[in-house]
Each structure stands twice: as structure tokens, then as C-alpha cells.
Amino acid sequence: MKRLFDKDTWQEIFGSIQKNKIRTIITMIGVLWGIFIFITLSGSSKGLDNGFERAFQSIASNSIFIWAQSTSLPYAGYKSNRNITLKIQDADVLKKKVKGIKFIAPRIVAGVFGSAGGNIVRGTKSGTYAIYGEYPEYIKIATSKIYDEGRFINESDIKYERKVCVIGERTQLELFEKDEDPIGEFISINKMNFRIVGVHKFVQGGGFGDDGDIYIPFTTFRKIFNTGDDVAFFMIAADEDIDGVKVEKEIRTTLKQIHKVDPNDERAIGGFNLGEVFKKTMDFAYGLTFLSLVVGIATILAGVIGIGNILLISVKERTKEIGIRRALGATPLEVRTQIILESVFLTILAGIIGIILGAFVLSGINAYTIDMTDFPYTNPTVPIYYILGALALMVILGTLIGIIPAQRAVSIKPIDALREE
């Protein structure tokens, strides 16, 4: 420790570096490049990771979408190509029979998938928007933001078939004046007055939604559109600790049993497992992070080996100098410490420069992608423990690689070194 803060030690280290400036700089570039690649790739993969999380933030990452299609196989006296329609009662059966379902939200819609939308009128303004019949569970699965002044559909709305609605941002913009508060106001949906109880903020990635969507109670929807017990599709959130793929499989199996569908019919029940997609996406991001770690460490290791080589050459060139120091009383520990300190110093210096350059590059990438919405990428940063870990690794590698030339230096006998020409 005393040698670490000794002025003469550092003068000798800087003197040695000055004698071989170009060679030292070229060797340091290896370590610098390694840490630069590590920081840049790690930060970039983190930006992709953040982008995927942002894309899925408006909906539960373990969500499953299930809808009915037409059969492809005959079964139990029914012909193939029979159209299947999901029913509201199916939700209760699924809750009882399928383990792992946390929330289930039956949904029905007018205005998408080829159906006619609702004709919405407010004063002299009008428009056609998609109208969804919803249950309160929907907001627990698709975490749509409802502005503070309002609320979403609740159980009382369902029970009493209330004519209330939640409108989208675009609907508000097109039907109301700029500074007009829509909460408590009325709009006409198919010539029926609905009181607005909330405005939802649209977030890209929230499923089938749009910023003009209007949500009304499911029971009210089926009454005014005469859809009976029909359901367009189910939105389901599985428990976090349950395999979503297994839950989806059990849901499909149960629905096939309910609607008399051949168990081998793969077309009758359609679905989309967002949890599976989310897992694959995050695995891809983690894979990039691991790749950056491997490439960075390999490059750093190559650079550190280069520093070890230059120190071996330096020791050989300073054989006589080392011999003189030994003859004047320098102990093997002092000689060894100086060589190792030089190795660690060069490694850390190159690493810090690489970190700074990597930070500048990530800052530039962040500035360029900050407003990007059509690609899942945002805030490319490197966790601080990654940086601290990289610095610790460089200290360890610098120390280990410095031991070889240090041992070479102390193995030189003073009398032999003094004879060196």
C-alpha cells in the first residue's frame, strides 16, 4: 500500500510509459476498444429491452387473446366449416375449469373486423368510431390510462345497464372544443344519449385498440346492438407464475369441448399469446446483452494480454536498470509492485477512456431515437453495476497479467543485469 502512494514509484511508471509512447498507446487501444464495445453493445441492447417493455407496458405481459373461427373438421354430427361463436357463459366455464386464469374480460365490438361502427353525434359534430362492450376486468389486463378526472366502466354500470361511456383522446378532440371538459357531457350513440365518465389515453401496443375507441358497458352494448350472449373475443391474463402457453392450450381445449369441436381441429379456436411473444422478445434482448458481454470481455482480455506483452518487452529493455535498483537495495516485492501497478494503471486508464467514449455514443443514439415510436427502442443505458463490474474485471486482469512480467523482473539476478549490454 505504501508503494501505491509513493511518488518515486509513479515517476518510474510514467518514465517507462514516456519511453514507449506509441507502443503503449497502440497496446492500450485493445483494452479501450474492448470496453467501448462492451458499453456500446450493452447500452444498445438495454435500449432494445426498454423499448420492448414500453411497447408492452399498456397490457399485461402474460395476456392471451382468444376468439372463435370456423371448424376445419367434422365432429359429433356437425359438418366442417361450421362457424363458432363464443358466448358470455364460456367465461364462467373457463374460470372454473382452467387453472392459472387471473382475469378474463369478454369483449364485443362494432366498427372493427368488418362490422359497422357506431354513429356518434355531439351537437353539430359527428363521426364513426369503434364501440367496445366491456367488463371492468378489461382495465386490469390492458392497463389503459384513464385521465384523473374520469373513470372506467364499473360493476354498477354492468348491473344496471347504464348508458355511460369512456371515449378516446381522438374522439374528444374531434367532438369537443379544445378547452372543453367532456366528463359529464353527453354524446349520442346510434341515437341514444350516453354520459361520458372517462377519457382514455391511447398507448401503442395495447392490443386491438385505437385512440378513437369508445367503451360502454357490455350489458348495455348487447341491448342496443341486439347481440345477445355473443362475445367477439376474450382477453385473458394468466397468473405471473403460471406457464402461459399451457394456460392457452387448456383454454382452447375447454372451448372445443363446450362448442363440440374436434380436439384435433387447430382452426376453430384462434388465439394470440402475448406472454409467449413477450418472453421470446425479452429472451432476444437478453441474448444481445449476453453477446455484448462475451464480445466485450474477449476483446478486453485480448487488450490486457497486449499490455502484458508490452510490459515483458519493457522489462527486457530495462534489465540493467532493474539490476541497478536491486543492487541498491530494492526488494523483489518493490520491483514486482511497480510492474503490476504499471499494468493495472494502463488497463484502468484505457478502460475509463473506453467508458467515456461509449457513453458519448449512447448519448448520441439516445438523442436520435428519443422520439422514435415506430420501433421498440428507448433510453440506451448501461446499468452502473455493469460499469463497476467491468472496472473490477480490468483491475483483476491487469493485476494477473502484470504478474508475469513482474515475476520476470524479479527473477533477474542483479549481477547478471549489471553485465547486460
Image: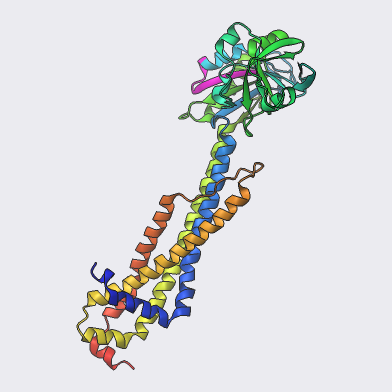
Closer to us: 393 or 184: 184
Is residue 106 magenta-colored?
Answer: yes
**Residue 193 appears in view:** yes
Answer left or right for 58 relative to 72.
left
Q: At which x and y percent is residue 228?
A: 69, 9
Q: Is the C terminus in the top left, top right, bottom left or bottom right quadrant? A: bottom left
At 24% from the left and 75% from the top, the residue drawn is 334
Q: Nearer the viewer, residue 314 or 354?
A: 354
- Residue drawn 65% across the image and 41% down it: 373
Please provide percent x and percent y for residue 285: 54, 46
Task: Answer whether residue 102 is magenta in the image.
Answer: yes
x, y (%) of residue 119? 78, 17
Above or below, 348 relative to 221: below
Q: Is residue 255 above or below residue 281?
A: above
Q: Going by the picture, which residue comes out furthest to the front?
A: 179
Give whichever of 201, 336 is nearer the camera.
201
Residue 354 at what x, y percent from top left? 48, 63
- Find residue 157 and report its image quarter: top right
Q: Which residues are magenta?
A: 96-107
The residue located at (67%, 42%) in the rendering is 374
